[in-house]
Amino acid sequence: MGDLLHNPYFATAAYYAVTGLAMIVFLSLFELVTRYQVWEELKKGNLAVGLATGGKIFGIANIFRYSISEHVSIGQALIWGTFGYVLLLVSYFIFEFMTPGYKIDDEIAKGNLAIGFIAMMISIGFSYVIGASLVR
């Protein structure tokens, strides 16, 4: 397998596949911890959910971008990407904790664009911090 990863086409396809599967798993986990049904809300056109979910997608992809560039094997990239995802998930819970006057998920489900935007920016911002720290 190591020799195949020296082929840039195979390596790109392999990292793409692993990251794609991780994205599906991690978005499913986010779906489990939110109080609203992401895909149902998106179908209804809830832009706040779209912003928050888009931020999560970008955040996960950005963490994996750093992880892939900093680690020499798919296994290491996956392990560090998963660790980065856990930290991103913690960021989500901290955001919820920092707003005791209302529930973030309830506001996003109601279509509150301001909260959806801030949720997106937290995911994106923390993904850069987390990603930059994923060094060899």
Image (spheres, rainbow, N blue to C red):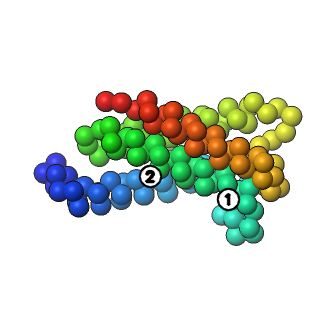
Residue 73 visible in the shown view: yes
**Circle 1 sits on which residue?**
50
- Kind of residue at badge 2: Ala
Query: For this rendering, which residue is in front, 118 or 110?
Result: 118
Q: Earlier in the sequence, mark 2 or mark 1?
A: 2
Q: How many marks?
A: 2
Q: Residue at x 53, y 46 (%)?
A: 59
- Residue 23 percent coordinates (x, y): 48, 54
Q: Secondary structure at mark 2?
A: helix
Tell whether 25 sits left or right of 107: left
Q: Which mark is residue 120?
A: none
Tell whether 69 sits left or right of 90: left
Q: Residue at x 55, y 53 (%)?
A: 57
Picture quadrant where residue 76 is located:
top left
- Residue 72 percent coordinates (x, y): 25, 40
**Circle 2 sits on which residue?**
22
Instruction: Check the image and report above or below for 120 versus 101.
Output: below
- Kind of residue at badge 1: Gly
Instruction: Check the image and report above or below for 66 versus 53.
Output: above
Q: Residue at x 46, y 42 (%)?
A: 63
Q: Secondary structure at mark 1?
A: helix
Tell whether 86 sits left or right of 51: left
Can you tell which of label 2 and label 1 is closer to the viewer?
1
- Residue 22 percent coordinates (x, y): 44, 52
Q: Residue at x 32, y 54 (%)?
A: 15
Picture quadrant where residue 91 is located:
top right
- Residue 50 percent coordinates (x, y): 67, 59
Instruction: Check the image and report above or below for 135 versus 51.
Output: above
User: Can you name the residue that lies furthest to the right here?
Assistant: 101
Residue 83 visible in the shown view: no
Picture quadrant where residue 97 is located:
top right
